[in-house]
Every structure is written in C-alpha cells, then in structure tokens.
Amino acid sequence: MIAEDQTMMRSALVSLLGLEPDLRVIGEVDRGDEVGAAVAARRPDVLLLDIELPGRSGLDVLEEVQAVSPATAVVIVTTFGRPGYLRRAMDAGARGFFVKDRPVEELADAIRTIAAGETVVDPSLAARALRSGPSPLTAREREVLAAADGGAPISELATTLHLSPSTVRNYLSSAIGKTGARNRAEALRTAREAGWL
C-alpha cells in the first residue's frame, strides 16, 4: 500500500512497482487521516508512508498503523532525510526509512528485504542520526512549539491547547532555550530542520 499525497509521485510508484513480478500495490491513500482505516481494511504486508501528508503526518499515524495491523511493515518514504525524522520513525516502529531521491529499483529491493523481516535504513542518514542524538524537546514542548507556527499570540495558543498563558510561555521558553534559538520563529525553524517537529 502507498500513502503519498502527490498524485504524480504516487502514480509513478504504483506503475514502477507494478513492473516487479513479485510485488503488487493493493491500495493507495493521499491523506494521513485516511491511512489507518485503509490499512485496517486491506492489511498490506508493507506500507510505503510519506511523512508530509495532509490531515495527519506520516510520523503521527505510525502508531495507529501498528495498532490496527501489527503485521504491516512500515517504510517511511520521504523527501526529507532528516536525522530527527529517522529517529522518530524508528522509535514509533517503522522498519525502513527511504529517501525519495534513491532509484526505484533500490526501493523494490528494500520492500523485499523488509517483507522478509529485516530493517532497511540509508547508512549515511543512520550515521547522521546517531551523531545528532535524540531530540532535546519533550512531547509537550514540541506540541506547543508546533502550535506557535504562524505567530498566534500566547493567549490564543493557551486557549487552543487548553493551557494557561504562563504554562504556554514556559514551554515556549524551554523550547527556545533547548534549540539555542533567540525567539520562537527561530526555534521552529531549527526544530523543523532537525526533524524534531
């Protein structure tokens, strides 16, 4: 099964993987909030899951996929080879991490390897992830920082997140400090570039 929002990319993957005699695409999804139901209905051996999906990110839907179909091996297929994304994906149960600029033949081989019970991760990305270490942000700091994208005032963030304004300020201040940023916009940029959000 393929979860990819870009129609051309999804169609190309379906066509190219369809040329492989031992692989068959049994479903396609273009939104993150539809992945869980599609996996539950089809129970694919392998799910190719993009990170940047409308409705819900691929990283956010990983645990749901594991819950509805534990036998489905998830391979993250993304444009963004960020160490933080790799770490989050593997921590959530992904069995592979594949950057979209690799040849489709390598993807087909990776699918076979993962279907056989192995894990496939780009070695240079894995090395960068090990060097960069884990995200310094807590889950709540990530949530508050992500909600701050767009520059909403503290009072609005507090209402949206069901927190007090002082608690929002504390989480933002902590996230800013941990990312070494000067303000929340810079903290957001740093966290996104590292793959922590």
Image (tube, rainbow, N blue to C red):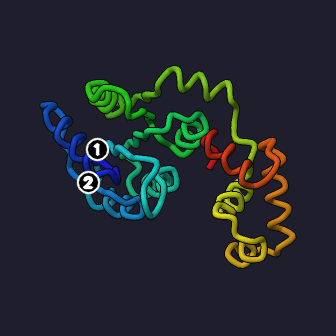
In the foreground, 81 or 40: 81
User: As displayed, is residue 2 above or below residue 115?
Assistant: below
The residue indicated by pointer 1 is 9
Left or right: residue 78 versus residue 6 is right
- Closer to the camera: disc 1 or disc 2? 1
Q: Residues within 10 Å of mark 1 (few under 14, many from 20)?
A: few
**Any mark on residue 28, and which?**
2
Above or below 189: residue 23: above
From the top left corner, tell me how far across and down residue 106 is, in percent. 31, 24
Q: Do the residues labelled 1 and 2 touch (CB within 8 Å)?
A: no
The number of numbered badges drawn on the structure is 2
Residue extending furthest toward the bottom: 159
- What residue do we see at 38% from left, 53% from top? 69
Q: Which residue is drawn at 41% across and 49% down?
A: 70
Relative to 106, residue 66 above or below: below
Q: Measure the alpha-carbon separation of dots 1 and 2.
A: 12 Å
The x and y percentages for residue 10 are 27, 47
The x, y position of residue 136, in whole percent, is: 75, 42
Neighbour tally class for label 2: few under 14, some 14-19, many 20 plus, Cα within 10 Å: some
Amino acid type, residue under disc 1 in the picture: Met
Callout 2 amino acid = Glu
Residue 22 falls in image quadrant: top left
Element assignment for label 1? helix
Please tell me whether mark 2 sits on a helix, a strand or a loop.
strand
Horizontally, is 79 left or right of 22 in the view? right
Q: Residue 18 carries which label?
A: none
Q: Earlier in the sequence, mark 1 or mark 2?
A: 1
Residue closer to the observer: 177 or 64: 177
Residue visible at 62% across and 46% down in the picture: 192
Please tell me in which quadrant of the rendered image residue 53 appears.
bottom left
Query: In the image, residue 81 lies at what x, y percent?
Result: 51, 34
